[in-house]
Image (cartoon, rainbow, N blue to C red):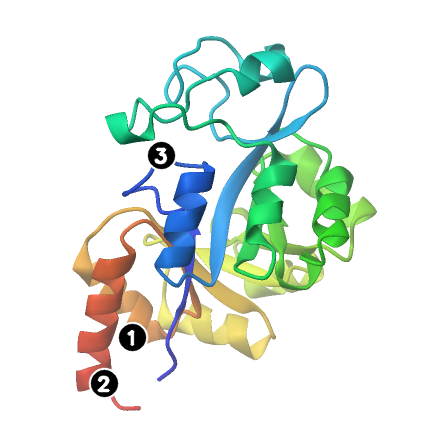
Amino acid sequence: MTTAKIVCHRGACLSAPENTVASLEGAIALGAFAVEFDIRTSRDGVLYVFHDETVDRTTDGTGRFGDLTSAQIDALDAGSWFAPEFAGERVPRLDRFLDACVGRIATYAEIKDADPARVRDMLAARYLLRDAWTFSFDQSIRAAARARVPDLRRMVLWSHVGSVERAVALNASILEFDSGDLSADRVNAAKSAGLITQMFYDGKDEAVFEDAVRFGIEQMNIDHVELFREVEARMKSILPA
């Protein structure tokens, strides 16, 4: 039985403010294979690592992200909301965030609002492209990625494609499941088709982790990394190799 690769969802988001350099450093400290992060564009065209459509939840500012200039975003405190010791943590520009990944961790770029070609070029300039992949919930961004950046590996969701055959037809490299659509047959079919299997789960139900281990999911896009490793070790002790 193989050990699943860990993808830290928004970085080590339980111990540091999500989508910050601090959360990236936490993911590296956890020994993660990859860091998942979100990308948005400022009003004046600068790419940032940020999740929400507005800055209200995770900074001391207010307003739509895309309406703010880079100068305004650079001035935001993106850490105090999480804990006092992170006061002054900034919303990272994508270039700085990627610089901190080089030679240390693979990258999973979820594009919320950005040109996938610009993302691809920034990854390639740092020799990160080989281990990188991307996804977007925005259909137009997914289409642009397929058409314009074929060398940036793409992930699809089972909930979007509904079959392994559709994932293959879209030239996906990774097929991600969630707890509601995971099954041994689907995972095995994906592997047989040459797809990497991944699961997203931001909860901590051990039964969900047990299924992921039992079915042989190859990559876990999760928040509760240490709990998953505990469950994985327990399952390995009782399941056949």
Front residue of 29 and 139: 29
Which type of secondary structure does the marked residue at label 2 adopt? loop
Q: Residues within 10 Å of mark 3 (few under 14, many from 20)?
A: many
Q: For the residue marked with disc 1, what is the amino acid?
A: Arg
Which tag, 2 or 1, sits closer to the chain's start? 1
Residue labelled with disc 3: 17
Compared with 32, 52 (above or below) is above
Which tag, 3 or 2, sits closer to the chain's start? 3
> Is residue 196 in view from this perspective?
yes
Q: Residue at x 25, y 72 (%)?
A: 232
Q: Are marks 2 and 1 in contact (CB under 8 Å)?
A: yes
Front residue of 166 and 138: 138
Q: Residues within 10 Å of mark 2 (few under 14, many from 20)?
A: few
Q: Residue at x 37, y 57 (%)?
A: 29
| Tag shown at residue 239 | 2
Which type of secondary structure does the marked residue at label 3 adopt? loop
Residue labelled with disc 1: 214
Q: For the residue marked with disc 3, what is the amino acid?
A: Pro
Which tag, 3 or 1, sits closer to the chain's start? 3
Which type of secondary structure does the marked residue at label 1 adopt? helix
Camera-near label (3 vs 1) is 3
